[in-house]
Each structure stands twice: as structure tokens, then as C-alpha cells.
Amino acid sequence: MSANGSIDPGTSIGAVRLRVADLDRIRRFYEDAIGLAVLDSTEGRARLGVNGATLVELVGDPSAPERPRNSTGLFHLAILVPSRGDLAAALHRVVESGWRLSGASDHLVSEALYLSDPEGNGIEIYRDRPRDQWPIRDGAIEMSTEPLDLDGVLRELRKEEPDRGMLAGTRIGHVHLNVADLTAAEAFYSGALGFDITVRGYPGALFVSAGGYHHHVGLNTWAGEGAPPPPSGSRGLEYFEVSLPGMAQLAAEEDRLREAGFEPRREDDRVLVTDPSGNGVALTAAG
């Protein structure tokens, strides 16, 4: 925890764990269409990532029911690539795999591609513009949703290079969640965890971050105000990781959650907690 009560500015988002019904199919999708490498695969589980770092963990459960449409959970996980050329390669990879985008947007601070995996988990693949190019209005970061110049992105494609999948430097940049109530979500993510609020301008949405980033967590009520959590054991998000710089910061977050009336539980070197909408969060310490 930093001196001003905010979460440590070195905080980032780590791996996202998903429960899936067809483990083999979903693993192949993240390999072929997204370009992640399989780091390990055992019966019922697979970890995929880049350069040894896990980005997505899959837990197979053939009996898992679909997540109900109007429930809380994952809106999308967002994979941040290092450059516009890497975004072009990602676009080309998706198309070559036979998959389709569901959208493509210019958010002023970033350029983003959108799609879903075969079980409906939302995915964003994006690249950030340099921070000194992020627009500021009334002292706050300005974000918008404008059409993405796909032709301009594709002109960055390095066609002479073979596809080696997602390259080093790729990571989970943020997660975006469906929640039941923005006031309760703000009390948890900003009040209890200490993320700073960065954007309030989107209808039905709120964005929070650490260290001045545009957002590490997006929150929305687009599944409906008061949406219930999915039944236990449903497909979709089990938890996402909030990676803190060290054990001291992890302990401070655990204490702050408990003081705020939540029930964090220690499991080895991480702290598990559930937000007011039933979304799982795992606090971890880097290194």
C-alpha cells in the first residue's frame, strides 16, 4: 500500500483462470487463434502464456454448465501486446485461424481487437499508445470508442517474418467484469483494494487502475443492474490475479480487505477474495 492509501503503483494484472467444458478445444483455440504457448498441460488443466509467464489457465470440467447470459462474471480478459506491429500479427493470426472478430475499436489510449473463445469468454487484444499521447480532459484520462483503422494496423504487418506466436512482453493488461452494482464494486476495488478511479464517463461502467494506467480493471452493469452471479461451477471466470510487487504489499492488502469487512483467505503465498458480485480475485506477490 502506498503512502496515500492507494494500491501500490507497481501493481499489475496476472493470469486469468477459466473453467471450461471442452479443455482440448479451448486450449487449441488459445494456441492457434491467439498465439499463446502451452506452458504445461496435465489431465484437467492447461497453462498458456508467453516466455514462461502464464496468461491464461484453463481448468477442464465437462459437466460445467454454461454461464447464464444475464449474470456477473468475465466481460473480457485483455491481452496487451508490445507494439502496433504485434497487433497486426494478432489480427492476421485470428483471421488465418478461421476465427472472426466481434469488434475493433480505437479507445484513444489504445487500439483494440475483440473476439470470444469457443465457450463465449470475451477476449480483447490491444496495444497501448505511448502515455504522453493519452488525452487528458479536466485532469482525467479521456477514453472513447471509435472505429479502428484496420487497414492502418495491417500495414504494420511484417509479412516476411514467420508467425512465432505472441512474443515476449505480451501480458494481461487488464480485465473487464460484469458486476451487479457499480457502487458496491467501487467500494471493493477502490475503497478496499485501493485502485484509483480513472474513468467514470462510460454509461454503466467504471474504470480503475494502479500507477496512473488507464485501467487495470473495468467494471460494468451491462448484464443488468442487480445481475446475479452464475451458479457455482459454471463455465467462465474462476478468478483473475492482482500481482503486487512483494509480500509486504500483499500483507497490507490482506489487512485492508479484512478491515473493510471482506473475508480474504490465505492460500500458500496468495490471498483469495470474492468481490460483491461473486467475481474471484487472487492477490499474489511478484517474484
Image: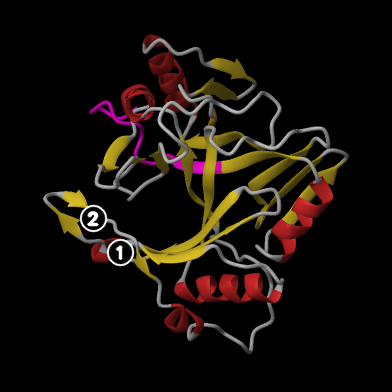
Indicate the quadrant where residue 222 lies: top left
Residue 106 placement, left or right of 83: left
Spot the residue most to the bottom: 160
Spot the residue most to the left: 138
Label 1 neighbourhood size at 10 Å, few (<14), some (14-19), many (20+)? Answer: some
Magenta highlight range? 1-14
Residue 256 screen position, x and y as percent? 38, 17
Q: Is residue 286 visible?
A: no
Mark 2 is on which residue type? Glu
For marks 2 and 1 on the same chain, the one whose residue lies earlier in the sequence: 1
Residue 3 placement, left or right of 151: left
Which residue has dot 2 on it?
142
| Residue located at (71% from left, 71% from top) | 97
Mark 1 is on which residue type? Leu
Residue in front for this viewpoint, 213 or 99 = 99
Residue 10 forms part of the magenta stretch: yes
Residue 159 screen position, x and y as percent? 61, 87
The image quadrant where one finds the N terminus is top left
Indicate the quadrant where residue 189 lies: top left
Labels 2 and 1 touching (C-beta < 8 A): yes
Picture disc at residue 143: none
Residue 117 placement, left or right of 69: right
Indicate the secondary structure of the residue bearing disc 1.
loop
Which residue has dot 1 on it?
108
Indicate the quadrant where residue 160 lies: bottom right
Residue in front for this viewpoint, 106 or 225 = 225
Q: Is residue 174 visible?
A: yes
| Residue located at (53% from left, 29% from top) | 279
Residue 12 screen position, x and y as percent? 45, 43
